[in-house]
Amino acid sequence: MTNSVTKRQIDELLEESEIKVETVYDKVTIVTCKLPNGFVITESSGAVSPANYDKKIGTEICMERIENKLWELEGYALAKQLYEGFVI
């Protein structure tokens, strides 16, 4: 077992995930990411005014947040595995 999470692992998780993007209230982007194991991450991004709303920008912001969350979750999972391997 390696002791690091790689960009490749994160990219593969995102590629294997189901991503849904929706716009609500004409100014908010909501992105849900269903990971291969069924866990769901949801992020949102919104504009103050519908006139300033850009779905592409909102999606990019949400996907960046989801990717950051995956780093955190995968890091925790790896740390737990390593810890359990040492204490068992």
Image (spheres, rainbow, N blue to C red):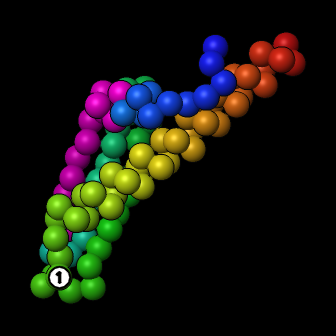
Q: Quadrant of residue 9?
A: top left
Q: Position of residue 36 (x, y in %)?
A: 37, 26
Q: Which residue is identified by label 1?
A: 52
For image coordinates 50% across by 30% down, the residue present is: 6
| Residue at 12% in and 85% down | 51
Over which residues does the magenta segment extend? 12-24
Confirm whether the magenta stretch covers residue 40. Answer: no
- Report whether residue 29 is seen: no
Q: Is residue 44 above or below residue 82?
A: below
Mark 1 belongs to which amino acid? Asn
Q: Look at the image and say whether residue 16 sits in the magenta stretch.
A: yes
Residue at 36%, 33% in the rendered image: 11
Whether residue 72 sits left or right of residue 39 in the image: it is: right
Q: Residue at x 41, y 41 (%)?
A: 40
Dot 1 lies on which element?
helix
Instruction: Please state which of residues 50 and 24 is positioned toward the viewer in this rendering.
Output: 50
